[in-house]
Structure formats: C-alpha cells, structure tokens
C-alpha cells in the first residue's frame, strides 16, 4: 500500500495544490471579501467622575472589511466606537477614537480618528425656582399667592456654567387670567443678565398655582331696615321697607362674597304709635362701596287687633 502512495508523488502533490487553489477561488466568488462603512455611536469611557465632556462627537464613521456572510450576519446596532478619557485633564485634550472590530472583520479606518475635546470640572447645586410672568393681569385683579412645585431644583454641568446660574425660572402666561389657575412649564437657568445657560436641570419642569382676587367685584344685595326700641303698648310693627329694595355694592372679591345684605341706620321706634318714614343712611362695611348712600325707609306701625 505504501509503495502505491509513494509512486508518482510529485504529480499527486501538484494535484492537491491545484485543488486548494480552485477551492480558494470558488469560495472567493461565493463569499467574497467586502468593504462596508457604518456610522456608529461614540462612548466616552473611563472619565473621572469630577470631569465633564459635552463636545465629544455623537457618531463617527468606521470602514470595515470581511467576508460577505460575516457582514450579512453581523448586527450593526451593536457596533460602538469609544474615547478612552482616563488621561484627560481640564482644558483642551487631543484624544484618539478607538474601535474594536467584531470577530471575522478587519478595521480599515475610523473617520475622524483624532479629535480635540474640551474637558471641564463637573459641578451641581440647588437653586430655587422663580416665576417670570408673560403679559399682565387686568387692573381689577390682585395676586393673592403663588405656590411653586418643586420649590428648588438641581442644576449640573460644566462648573463655569453652573456657577454662573443666577436663578431658575418658569415662564407663565398670565394675560387674561381672572380666576385661580395652575400651569406647567419647562424650566430655564439664567445668568445675572437673563441669558439662558447650558446646564442640566432636574427636574426640568415645574408646576405653579396662582390664587387671585378681584380688586373690584359688583354684587346686588337687598336693603334691610333694623329697628331699636319698642312701640307703644297696644301697637305693633306691621312691616319695614326700603326704597330702593336692593342696591349694587362694590369691593374686593373676598369681602363682597361675605355680604348678604346692606342695612340702614337703625330706626328708633320707642313708644311709636304711628308709622315712621324718612331718609336714612346706609351702613357699609369697611372696604365696601356703593353709589347710593341713603334710602327711603318706612316702618309701618299699627294698632294690635283685639
């Protein structure tokens, strides 16, 4: 058997090499090497917790080569480029964007592969929220109270920007409002000049509740006539009346809402044996006004029936 194998071995070796070459060309035609380009996200790794980088690119382009079946089966969503920030310091830093190709693939290039990033110190602090009204209330509206939730937020980011925050504001449109209302608005961080700063705000929205009062509210109420004393023996008060029977009073909303009637000055009926009538002044509570100051009053008095 060994004799047959050793016979004509140069020809057999040549045939084996030819078969390998043919297999290579066949496989190359069926599964050729291809070049592909992907846009992949960039991650910043190993950054000191006291630093912040906000101008690193979101994505870069990577060019890879590999067999077609490997490319087809590869999940491009899993590709990531990275910046190793372990050695950066505050200020400008030149860094390399790295990329590790998946198994079976080769990296051709990363575009761009070197960039300059600005590194700043990280800072955060608590800042109270203030409201900034847009428009204004009408002249007959008074602001009673403002309640903001939350009362303060955390601003964070570049130390220089965070330190420049003068206040965090919530813009609220108050034009045309006449009753209690609430609003939700996105918050902004302002410097002392009112410029909006590039910082993170957590939470980034706030809610405000406005409680309003009407400075002038009109209300129609009846006029009542009080009496003092007692009529003569054998007589009684049949009725009391005022002309006009009702009038319009004006005042702040919280005062007007407590008014149910307006009284005249008391009418003294002590020992009276006949009806009393005349002009009497109105008694207006403090803060309540009326265009009418006196009314015609009549107290009808009659003999008791036997």
Image: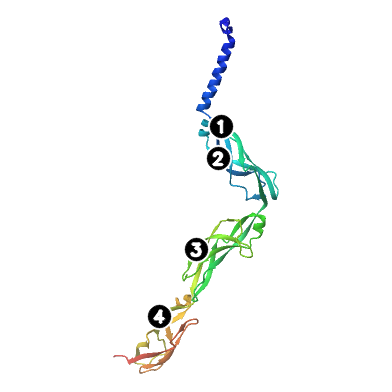
In front: mark 4 or mark 3?
3
Of tags 4 and 2, which is closer to the observer?
2
Task: State the image quarter where residue 96 is shown.
Answer: top right
Answer whether residue 66 is visible to the viewer in this image: yes
Q: What is the spatial separation of the Cα atoms under label 1 and label 2, in whole angstroms?
A: 13 Å
Give the labeled residue for mark 2: 38
Left or right of 236 in this view: 155 = right
Helix, strand or loop under label 2: strand
In this rendering, the label closer to the viewer, 3 or 2 = 2
Q: How many marks?
A: 4
Mark 4 or 1: the one toward you: 1
Residue 100 visible in this rendered orientation of the protein: no
Residue beneath disc 1: 66
The vertical placement of 276 against 33, above or below, is below
Residue 192 locus on image (x, y percent):
64, 65
Q: Is residue 276 above or below residue 164?
A: below
Of residues 269 and 297, the one nearer the viewer is 297
Marks 3 and 2 sit apart, C-alpha to C-alpha, by 45 Å
Residue at the disc numbered 3: 183
Which is closer to the viewer, label 1 or label 3? Answer: 1
Mark 4 vs mark 1, CA separation in Å: 90 Å
Dot placed on the residue nearer the N-terminal end, 4 or 3: 3
Real-space Cα separation, disc 1 to disc 3, in angstroms: 57 Å
* Residue 22 in the image: above or below residue 5: below
Cα–Cα span, label 4 and label 2: 77 Å
Circle 4 crowding by C-alpha within 10 Å: few under 14, some 14–19, many from 20: some
């Amino acid at each position: 058997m060994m004799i047959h194998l050793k016979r004509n071995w140069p020809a057999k070796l040549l045939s084996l090499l030819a078969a390998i070459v043919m297999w290579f060309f066949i496989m190359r035609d069926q599964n050729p090497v291809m070049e592909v380009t992907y846009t992949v996200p960039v991650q910043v790794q190993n950054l000191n917790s006291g630093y912040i980088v906000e101008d690193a690119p979101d994505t870069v382009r990577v060019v890879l080569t590999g067999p077609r079946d490997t490319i087809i089966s590869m999940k491009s969503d899993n590709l990531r480029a990275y910046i190793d920030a372990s050695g950066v310091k505050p200020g400008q830093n030149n860094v390399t964007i790295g990329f590790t190709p998946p198994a079976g693939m080769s990296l051709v290039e990363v575009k761009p592969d070197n960039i300059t990033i600005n590194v700043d110190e990280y800072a955060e602090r608590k800042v109270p929220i203030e409201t900034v009204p847009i428009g204004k209330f009408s002249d007959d509206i008074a602001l009673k109270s403002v309640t903001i939730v939350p009362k303060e937020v955390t601003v964070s980011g570049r130390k220089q920007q965070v330190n420049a925050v003068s206040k965090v504001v919530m813009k609220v449109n108050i034009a045309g409002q006449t009753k209690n209302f609430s609003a939700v608005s996105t918050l902004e961080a302002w410097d002392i000049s009112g410029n909006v700063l590039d910082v993170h705000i957590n939470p980034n929205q706030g809610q405000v509740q406005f409680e309003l009062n009407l400075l002038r509210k009109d209300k129609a109420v009846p006029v009542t006539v009080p009496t003092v004393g007692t009529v003569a023996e054998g007589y009684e008060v049949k009725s009391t009346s005022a002309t006009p029977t009702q009038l319009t009073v004006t005042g702040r909303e919280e005062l007007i809402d407590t008014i149910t009637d307006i009284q005249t000055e008391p009418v003294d009926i002590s020992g009276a044996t006949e009806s009393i009538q005349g002009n009497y002044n109105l008694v207006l509570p403090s803060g309540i006004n009326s265009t009418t100051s006196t009314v015609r009053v009549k107290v009808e008095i009659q003999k008791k029936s036997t």
